Image: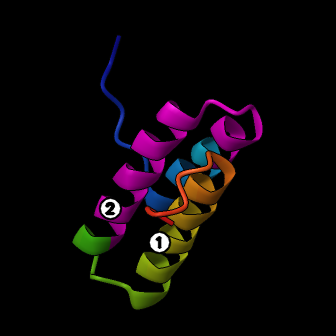
Amino acid sequence: MQNVKLDWEELRNMGRMAFEERRFQECEQIWTDALDEAKKSGNDPDKIASSNMDLSELYNGAGQYSRA
């Protein structure tokens, strides 16, 4: 299988699907990758903020309130 590099928006969308299906561990990895991508690709503050909000939503949904 080929290793395909996904862009920030694709990662966010994949993470959203995982979140909605309650696959929290997978979601965390994907959204962490999205945050890393946002930091690498020009350090866009809007993308970084959105990625941080996604992770906060995940931690809230998973009951990890101290991480949110």
Q: Nearer the viewer, mark 1 or mark 2?
A: 1
Give the answer, above or below, for where 36 lies relative to 19.
Answer: below
Q: Find residue 24 and report its horizontal and vertical position in percent.
A: 57, 36
Q: What secondary structure is the stretch in magenta mostly built from?
A: helix
Which of the marked residues, 1 or 2, is nearer the chain's N terminus? 2
What is the basis of the colouring in this image?
rainbow
Q: Find residue 66 and report its horizontal and vertical position in percent.
A: 46, 63
Quadrant assignment for the N terminus: top left
Report the disc number at residue 37: 2
Report the disc number at residue 5: none
Spot the residue most to the left: 40
Q: Is residue 23 magenta?
A: yes
In the rendered structure, the answer to whether residue 53 lies left or right of residue 43 reads right
Label 2 crowd bin: few (<14), some (14–19), many (20+), radius 10 Å: many
According to the image, label 1 marks what residue?
52
In the rendered structure, the answer to whether residue 1 lies left or right of residue 49 reads left
Q: Label 1 vs label 2: CA separation?
A: 12 Å
Magenta-tinted stretch: 16-38
Q: Amino acid at mark 2?
A: Glu
Count of marks, rendered view: 2
On the image, which quarter does residue 50 sit in? bottom right
| SS class, disc 2 | helix
On the image, which quarter does residue 42 sit in? bottom left
Q: Amino acid at mark 1?
A: Asn
Observer-nearest residue: 59 or 31? 59
Observer-nearest residue: 68 or 25? 68
| SS class, disc 1 | helix
* Residue at x 49%, y 32% (from the top left corner): 26
Give the answer, above or below, for where 59 lies relative to 47.
Answer: above
Q: Find residue 43 and report its horizontal and vertical position in percent.
A: 28, 82
